[in-house]
Image (spheres, grey):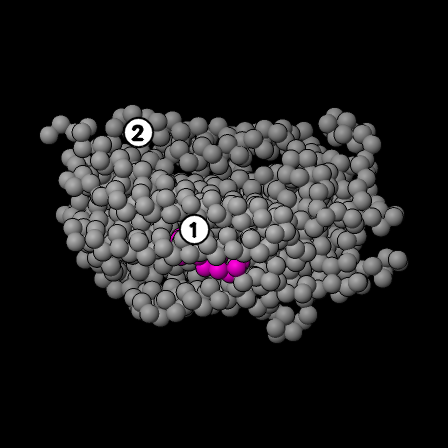
Amino acid sequence: MSTAALESRLNSLWETPKTTRGWFATVDHKELGIRYLVTAFIFLIVGGLEAILMRIQLSRSEMSILSPEAYNQVFTMHGATMIFWYASPILSGFSVYLVPLMIGARDMAFPRLNAFTYWTYLFSGIFLYIAPALGQAPHAGWFAYVPYTLTLYSPGLGMDIYALALIFLTISTTGGAINFIVTILRLRAPGMAISRMPLFLYSTLTVSVVILFALPALTAACIFLELDRRWGTHFFSIAHGGETFLWQQLFWFFGHPWVYVIFLPATGMISLIVPVFSRRPIVGYPFVAISTVLTGVVGFGVWLHHMFTIGMSDMAMSFFSAGSMTIALFTTVQVFAWVSTVWNGHPVATASMYYALGSIALLVIGGLSGVFTGIIPVDWQAHNTYYVVAHIHYVLIGSNMFPVFAAFYYWLPKMTGRMLDERLGKWSFWVMFIGFNVGFFPMHILGLLGMPRRIYTYEPGLGFDGLNMTVTIGAFILGLGILLSIINFFNSLRWGKVAGCNPWNSDGLEWETNSPPESYAVAHIPVVVTRNPLWDDFAEEDDPENERVLDSGRLTPTTTWLDAEPVGIATIPDDSLAPLILAIVMFVFFLTLTFQMVWSALTALVIIFLTGCYWMWPHASKEIS
Amino acid sequence: MSTMEQISSRPPSRYALNHLPIDQHRGSNAMWCVIATEAMLFVCMFGAYYYLGTNKDRWGIEEPPSLEYPLILLVILVASSVVLEWGKKQASRRNYSSGRLALWVTVSLGIVFMVLQTFEYISHWKTLAPYSDSYGSIFYAITTLHALHVVAGLLLLGYVGILPQIGDSARTPHRAYETVTLYWHFVDVVWVWIVLLLYVIPHFQGHAYVR
């Protein structure tokens, strides 16, 4: 069979028709990955605008742009949006798009689940934003401590929507994690043994496992909160034998591993980008891989450091303080690996590399302030001040947003087929980098001066005014820098240079596909023999006998999880509207729960079950004989 | 660069993929992940149970819950697991009719479980309700969460029961029977833990306290 005939045959099997139904029914991971990225980026902009609102309010003493209640709602929405609906989903977006390409598979292990997790993510975000639309946004911070969140102090629907939206989102996130685990462990290209996996897959795999074990604590906490608020139970009310700290224990048992969920995939991206632009393989691959996994494991043993001020035994505090500082070791291993890679390589100054190196610098600052706050007496001093705000933003922006921008400059040419402008990209980087440091570094000082977090204003003459104005100016500069990159993106779509398969001369399998990739990704399933497949002299797709085309249906090989020896052929289901319908019915289900409409909720559950049956029912799959 | 040269000097492997068997394992792979996360949900609930009990001088032991119902329920659930496991073996040996029979027997046992648990709730409710105190809240939260898992299991079993094919299949879902069996065993194991932690241990716990 000629190559052209093979390609058109594969395309007819894998392509989603460009119709309205096709748009809603697609299970193509490339399409869904881009949707994840776009949706998460919109949440970034929304959360960013909320931050700007807060900064205007705080720019001078005794401003009254926002009322105290409005300020509380804005910072809660800002935190919840950024941490739950931006930081993790944007990384999922990259993973959904890139993981199958990186492992030489033609799609995820469960493509319909993939579509379902996207739709539930989108709808849970919409569900959350019903609250501000009703004028009853949650107002207790993203961590929603009881008893403030019980009905006595938080009447209205805000906290109910917060709790139910999070349960809704955990369904999406857990589904996504299961999909990544099975995809990475079962669908890797023949020969891509676990010792040859790109490091990004180590981080995606680690956080997926972390999600499985950490998210149930959030689900349990939110169930308890909702039961206490609307169904008369007593989990948190002291008067009836409840415990207010139960919320904090459960929330932070989830909350701290979650920090690594939004941190590790970003370090995985840096571990791919830095070597490419240093023109050499990464230094200490096994150490980076092991420290990635250990970060995930030890991340479960540090949660009490969010609660050092609640009063507990010295033993418990010492243990968790030590655990918190141990984590820094693993991050340090990664940082040294990146620095040595640059040091021993021949660095190329691209916009993507700027962002990656900038992120390392910010991560070191944020990491060090984290070590300080891990020390108990320092924590007592800094607790609930702007010092902590500075710390989390250095860590989260430094090790999530900057790597995400590095990844955008690196992988967008693959997704759109067009190069972004390097000059504008570097401008954008410097504006963002300066804006970020002007905006957040003074917060360290503000915190040490004693400015508490979550206050809507402050009195003049406390020495806060000048620094707060600086912070606000920094926030605007940071926003401007992001805007430059957005402009750059839209310009590139029209005027960008055509990217070609491998514009950066990178090593990963994803660069062997066209830009943007074909619907079937690769005509011949690649075979991998080294860690840097495109840099070795082995031709991954060389298959003169057509032994690895799998063109008799929507098929991709499955392999053993350690050595990636091929053992079977996975059948990949085709497009379906069921995931979208299921997500819509779930949205209705959570809406009815918000208003305690029991019978409607039960009806919704029945429809959920029937939709699930329709989804799973064995239909004749798309086959060409 | 040394590692790279080492590895690429090895002769590259060649693989022919076209004649490999259809993969039948992704469903149970995913089910293990579901079980991991659901088990963790119960661990969190049990954690909450003990956390709520830490500061009390006694914890639900004024009158420990009666053992009658939970032990009968345990026997029923374990029996259903054994039957289902046998059915799975039959299905994998292509004895589809015995497989289906075992599956529907399991469903019936599951329904008996639900009915008996309703009776348990009715008798328990006279002395304890979810809104009596924190003990009632967590007790009913855990047992109801488990009951919801039983209902979900029954729905899944019912779905597999009406599937046109319950053995190996070239079309998704592959081996749905095996996958659902895993889930049902999990629900069973959770009940063992509930009986142990919520029902049995409180009977002995009382002796550990100095009154």
Label 2 Cα crowd, 10 Å radius (few <14 / some 14-19 / many 20+): many
SS of the residue at dot 1?
A: helix
Q: Chain of mark 1?
A: A
Between residue A20 and residue A339, name the one nearer to us. Answer: A20
Instruction: Give me the residue at 26% from left, 52% from top.
Output: B120
Give yes or no for residue B62 being in the magenta stretch: no
Q: Chain of mark 2?
A: A
Q: Is residue A273 visible?
A: yes
Between residue A518 and residue A424, name the one nearer to us. Answer: A518
Q: Which residue is mark 1?
A: A83
Instruction: Give me the residue at 50% from left, 32% from top.
Output: A294
Q: Amino acid at mark 1?
A: Ile
Q: Tell me which segment is drawn in magenta.
A: B149-161
Give yes or no for residue B159 being in the magenta stretch: yes
SS of the residue at dot 2?
A: helix
Q: Which quadrant does the C terminus of chain A fall into?
A: bottom right
Q: Is residue A284 above or below residue A532?
A: above
Q: Nearer the viewer, mark 1 or mark 2?
A: 2
- The CA distance from mark 1 to mark 2 is 26 Å
Label 1 Cα crowd, 10 Å radius (few <14 / some 14-19 / many 20+): some
- In the figure, is residue B39 to the left or right of B160? left
Q: Which residue is mark 2?
A: A317
| Badge 1 or badge 2: first in the primary sequence | 1
